[in-house]
């Protein structure tokens, strides 16, 4: 038994599961695409306005799509007892959880990254800022998954935890939203974005190192 | 295998209160190698709560549980124990083999290979069957295969006989006796009359 083997076994298991229930991947992605395509219809044919608000639209949609996908992170494990077995493993639970969150991000966060450039062009964003948009999504969406995991772990034992989950998690998402959409907007007007990216990297590293512990503790509380 | 080393699970003055109702208090017990502890009692008498305390999922309202002298929060305890509850921890979308491989990655490998374990619970040849296609009794046996192929000395079983036919019950009793003969120990709840002639069975009646 080695920890790395357990870590990759968890990732592999969750990816196979996601592949066998595809709606889990499709739902957040569909939501993301749908919201963004509806905006031009609502705002009307004002290319300049769309161009200005595009970073905000894309980031807010990504954030809501991430929230929509959160519940699936621990729900089925909680319902079928796999979570109990995970907590009884001699391996450090926080590392196993990191594996689960990573698999969840691969399934729900990475697809957003893949369609984002297309949607950005659709909203008329200057092509020069596409790279920065992708970079902020790459740095920001894992943070959404990691912070979201704490919230889900706290609410997975409740019957109707959805509302509480959004109240818990949304305030913590705000810094990511502010710095990420600001970075993209600055890049679109040709300004340097170094500080925003540095802050996003700092937030990501902090979430990576700090989020798994409260998540593990909250899961232990949820199964009791 | 280190199963032969002397092991002991002790409960000291345990109490459990649920919804302002005292389920049990001042409960004490000791289980050693080759022993079985059977918890009996009506529905709602706290059997499952006690098992969950022994697993560390629940804090006892008073008292403590020790494994070989150490508190059960110690990682050694989780290396030595295995638990099967009402929820079996089987992913229904995964095949039998995939389920067992994940379980093996999360625990320490025992002496028995996956194939041997499947053969012993009479599920040989079911490797590639998705778990959702198994019957309730077959799922129970799959979760028992997990006990057999991982290293563990203490089995904690919550109603292991539910959903099993007569053969299944005999099979589990036989596996339990073998486990005890090898120096293991078992704590379980059951409404079924245990038939374990070669094993020292202690009983605790919760009321």
Image: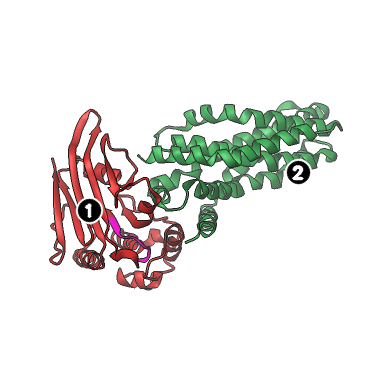
Chain colours: A green, B red
Q: Quadrant of residue A160?
A: top left
Q: Which residue is label 2 attached to?
A: A117
Q: CA distance from mark 2 to mark 1?
A: 57 Å
A104 vs A209, nearest the viewer: A209
Q: The residue marked by circle 1 belongs to what chain?
A: B
Mark 2 touching mark 1, by CB under 8 A?
no
Query: Residue at 25% across / 65% down in the picture?
Result: B183
Q: Quadrant of residue A61?
A: top right
B70 inside magenta stretch:
no
Magenta part of the chain: B149-155
Query: Residue at 31% across / 62% down in the picture?
Result: B144
Q: Secondary structure at mark 1?
A: strand
Q: Is residue B206 above or below residue B101?
A: above
Q: Is residue B105 above or below residue A24?
A: below
- Left/right placement of residue A57 relative to residue B148 reads right
Q: Are marks 2 and 1 on the same chain?
A: no
Q: Position of residue A216 (x, y in %)?
A: 47, 41
Q: Secondary structure at mark 2?
A: helix
- Left/right placement of residue B185 relative to residue A196 reads left
Q: The residue marked by circle 2 belongs to what chain?
A: A
Q: Quadrant of residue B139?
A: bottom left
- Left/right placement of residue B65 relative to residue A55 reads left
Q: Is residue A4 above or below residue B122?
A: above
Work out whether residue A166 can be spotted.
Answer: yes
Query: Residue at 33% across / 73% down in the picture?
Result: B119
Q: Which residue is label 1 attached to?
A: B188
Q: Position of residue A48 (x, y in %)?
A: 83, 28
B152 inside magenta stretch:
yes
Q: Position of residue B50 (x, y in %)?
A: 24, 43
Query: Residue at 24% across / 36% down in the picture?
Result: B16
Q: Position of residue A211 (x, y in %)?
A: 55, 38
B101 vs B90, nearest the viewer: B101
């Amino acid at each position: 038994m080695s920890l790395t083997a357990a870590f990759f076994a968890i990732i592999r298991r969750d990816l196979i599961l996601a592949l066998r229930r595809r709606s889990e991947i499709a739902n957040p992605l569909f939501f993301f695409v749908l919201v963004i395509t509806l905006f031009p219809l609502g705002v009307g044919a004002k290319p300049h306005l769309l161009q200005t608000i595009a970073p905000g639209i894309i980031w807010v949609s990504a954030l809501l799509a991430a929230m929509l996908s959160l519940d699936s992170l621990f729900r089925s494990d909680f319902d079928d007892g796999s979570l109990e077995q995970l907590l009884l493993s001699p391996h450090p639970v926080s590392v196993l959880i990191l594996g689960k969150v990573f698999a969840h991000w691969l399934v729900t966060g990475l697809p957003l990254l893949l369609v984002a450039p297309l949607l950005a062009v659709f909203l008329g964003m200057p092509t020069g800022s596409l790279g920065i948009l992708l970079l902020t999504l790459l740095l920001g969406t894992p943070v959404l998954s990691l912070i979201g995991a704490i919230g889900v772990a706290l609410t997975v034992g409740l019957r109707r935890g959805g509302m509480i989950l959004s109240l818990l998690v949304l305030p913590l998402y705000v810094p990511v939203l502010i710095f990420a959409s600001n970075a993209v907007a600055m890049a679109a007007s040709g300004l340097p974005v170094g500080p925003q990216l540095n802050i996003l990297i700092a937030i990501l590293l902090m979430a990576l190192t700090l989020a798994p512990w409260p998540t593990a503790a909250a899961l232990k509380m949820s199964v009791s | 295998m280190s199963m032969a080393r002397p092991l002991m699970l002790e409960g000291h003055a345990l109490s459990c209160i649920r919804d302002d109702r005292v389920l049990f208090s001042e409960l004490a017990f000791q289980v050693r190698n080759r022993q079985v502890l059977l918890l009996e009692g009506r529905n709602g008498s706290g059997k499952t709560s006690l098992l969950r305390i022994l697993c560390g999922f629940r804090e006892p309202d008073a008292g403590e549980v020790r494994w070989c002298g150490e508190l059960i929060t110690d990682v050694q305890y989780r290396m030595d124990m295995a638990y099967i509850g009402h929820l079996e921890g089987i992913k229904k979308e995964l095949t039998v083999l995939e389920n067992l491989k994940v379980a093996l990655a999360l625990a320490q490998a025992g002496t028995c290979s996956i194939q041997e374990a499947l053969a012993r619970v009479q599920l040989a040849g079911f490797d590639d069957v998705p778990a959702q296609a198994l019957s309730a009794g077959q799922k129970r046996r799959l979760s028992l295969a997990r006990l057999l192929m991982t290293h563990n000395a203490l089995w904690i079983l919550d109603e292991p006989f539910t959903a099993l036919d007569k053969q299944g019950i005999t099979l589990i009793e036989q596996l339990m006796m073998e486990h005890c003969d090898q120096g293991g120990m078992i704590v379980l709840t059951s409404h079924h009359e245990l038939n374990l002639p070669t094993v020292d069975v202690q009983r605790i009646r919760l009321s």
